Amino acid sequence: MQFLQKQHIPKAIQIIQVIEFLTEYFGKLPEKRIYQNFLILEFLKLFVKLRKWHIIDKYGLMISNNNKFGEADHREDSAVNLFLEKWGGLQKDSPVMDIKLAKEQLQKAIEPMPEFNQGLYDIIGDKQVSIIKTLPIPNDLKKRDYESQFNILRIQIGEILYLLRPLIYCSCILKFGTRSYSPYLISLSIDILRFLIQFKIQIFRKSQEEELNLRAKDAIICYILRNPFYTQILKQKCLNKILGVFLKEENILHRIVIGLLDLRSSKCLLL
């Protein structure tokens, strides 16, 4: 996979997803054959994602392509690198001091105290604020917490489960069938385990917080629309009855609503 460079990874994942969609809707294959093809494609996708995890995410929390803060991370890194090139020799850590005593002194002081300032603080509004906080340098304390051995271990175990879950899900469907709840519950168990392992992990970037939120939302949508729950419970016992109160089944609006939900519940979108 050395030929797969950083800039090619998002396109490679998109191509695999398109092939999965075409396999489901235009292949005219039996359901078992569709999931056999999905399993092969998910293995290929796994290799691409492992490559991304290595060269882009550095074996940390993986940031998806649709994360709106992903580009902000790159701009922040560029700003930090530019700052360090020009001002790399500047002291970034203030001298050790009694924070409680310093706060008490600040509350009593009307004018800024030179003995407290020591050239490390500036006046913003009516408060003394660390000059370092106004510079484009990431929060070192949060970054150190993020890079702690135990935190990284939790992240990596969770990411491995996140990568393997689609393969396990496809394998379970091939073994138990699409009407069985076993693949559904096994997949759900893996996601719950991942959530518990990564619960309140230390993060230091907005993109990481956004990524965890996106995964939680996607998981909720997937388990609502994933079969057999969608067809046997949500669609049959809830949607048809609720829509039937307002619209007849042959009504065009009724068909559009159900059709859109059926499309969103496509197998390839819920792996």
Image (cartoon, helix red, strand yellow):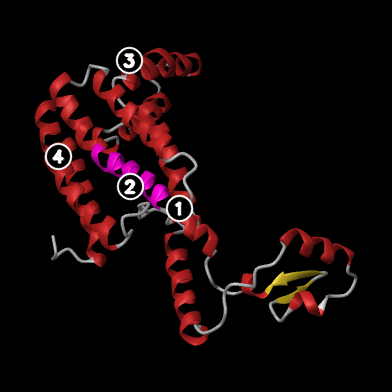
Q: Do callouts 4 and 1 mark residues in contact (Cβ within 8 Å)? A: no
The spot of residue 24 in percent (x, y) is: 17, 36
* Observer-nearest of 130 and 233: 130
Q: Name the residue under label 2.
A: 156
- Disc 3 versus disc 2: nearer the observer: 2
* Observer-nearest of 257 and 98: 98
Residues shaded magenta: 149-164
Q: Do callouts 3 and 4 mark residues in contact (Cβ within 8 Å)? A: no
* Observer-nearest of 115 and 92: 115
For marks 2 and 4, the one nearer the N-term is: 4
Please give the name of the residue rendered at 10% of the width and 33% of the height, measured from the top-left corner. 36
Q: How crowded is mark 3: few (under 14 residues within 10 Å), some or many (20 or more)?
A: few
The spot of residue 150 in percent (x, y) is: 40, 47
The spot of residue 64 in percent (x, y) is: 36, 52
Q: Mark 3 points at which residue?
A: 232
Q: Do callouts 1 and 2 mark residues in contact (Cβ within 8 Å)? A: no
